[in-house]
Image (spheres, rainbow, N blue to C red):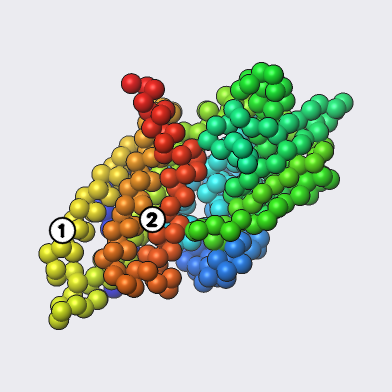
Amino acid sequence: MTTNPADILSLPRAGWAGDEVAMLYDMSTRFLSEEIAPHYEEYEKNEIVDRSAWEKAGAAGLLCASMPEEYGGSGGTYAHESVIAEALGHVGVDGFGIALHNAIVAPYILHYGSEEQKKKWLPKMATGELIGAIAMTEPGAGSDLQGIKTRAEKDGNQYRINGSKTFITNGQNANLIIVVTKTDPTKGAKGTSLIVVETDEVEGFTRGRNLDKIGLKANDTSELFFNDVRVPTANLLGHEEGQGFIQLMQQLPQERLLIGAQAIGMIERALAVTVDYVKERKAFGKAVVEFQNTQFKLAELKTEATIGRVFYNDCVKRHLNGGLDPVTASMAKYWLSDLQCKVVDECLQLHGGYGYMNEYPIARMYRDARVQRIYGGTNEIMKMLIGRSL
């Protein structure tokens, strides 16, 4: 009998997931297992998930679950987005970029977009007709968002955008991209604005290569180039220029919490597949699970994973109540992603030589986990933010 990742800990989603959210988790797990997992090796090989998969996810209600029904969403909360992200990890299709589309890109439009913008873009994001990305990182500016060089100059009733971005998740598929730009380079952070580019409707936009990554191969991560890309000034998010940095800072706690959701999802799956493996694998005439070292190691990992789940649950409850501060979100991002890498590494070790074979799920988890400590602000940056609060 295969261990269910959702059952590997005794406290799954305690305190914030009611019946409706639990039903969404079950439906998400079923959909991902039946519609995405059978094709996932192909997506890994092609280094991109087919657009048809996005459309199926939209039809199944897995896109924009937290967006209001009036804009095509399901009227849920971050709790709904969390269980979708966890289901991705539990099924093992972590490279399907719907979590970023749902819980990072769409909220910028909901919170800062005009009524016209929300009605124009969110329904199409909910169906998968529009796939979202947010273009922050540049070749010379990663965690330091104040250092971006991409420029948007006003020209009549249009912005003319020039610059380049890199490491952009959903970069090949995305046809709605929130671009972090400088509308006034003389003002530093106060000169930053967020502008939406619909790539199907503009000239001068090009995609670079689909980047060759260590892990998360199924997710298209790309370079993007803007060469005199013209968009209407109506595509500015917010009622005036210069609000971009504030908008980014306001939304980063949810982004970092989402990384925590992805971490705990993989942690639970890693433990589940490892428990199954050590029960079946024989060494020196008995199952590997019967060795004291195996039992002690799994006891340590389950304890740490349980602490991680309790911490994550508490952060979700705080966030749903409007009380997740940036420092605690930074703690969740760095500590849970560090724990994710530790747990996966220890679980791979318990697989022995087979853990190093790509045909075993733990090998893919080992590759996929590493970037969690980098994106969303490196864990070193998280520690700096926490340190400043002391």
Provide the residue designation for mark 2.
266
Provide the residue designation for mark 1.
296
- Graded by Cα atoms within 10 Å as few (under 14), some (14 to 19) or many (20 or more), the crowding at tag 1 reads few
Q: Amino acid at mark 1?
A: Phe
Q: State if disc 2 and disc 1 touch (CB < 8 Å).
A: no
Q: Could you say which is closer to the camera, residue 14 or residue 167?
A: 167
Please tell me whether mark 1 sits on a helix, a strand or a loop. helix
Q: Quadrant of the C terminus?
A: top left
From the top left corner, tell me how far across and down residue 34 is, in percent.
50, 69
- 297 horizontally vs 229: left or right: left
Above-or-below relation of 8 to 196: below
- Graded by Cα atoms within 10 Å as few (under 14), some (14 to 19) or many (20 or more), the crowding at tag 2 reads many
Instruction: Please indicate, yes or no, whether residue 139 appears anywhere in the rendered image.
Output: yes
| Front of the two marks 1 and 2 | 1
- 302 horizontally vs 171: left or right: left
Residue found 63% across the figure and 40% down from its top: 138
Please tell me whether mark 2 sits on a helix, a strand or a loop. helix
Residue found 14% across the figure and 68% down from its top: 291
Above-or-below relation of 39 to 168: below
Mark 1 or mark 2: name the one nearer the start of the chain. 2
Residue found 23% across the figure and 54% down from its top: 302
Above-or-below relation of 11 to 26: above
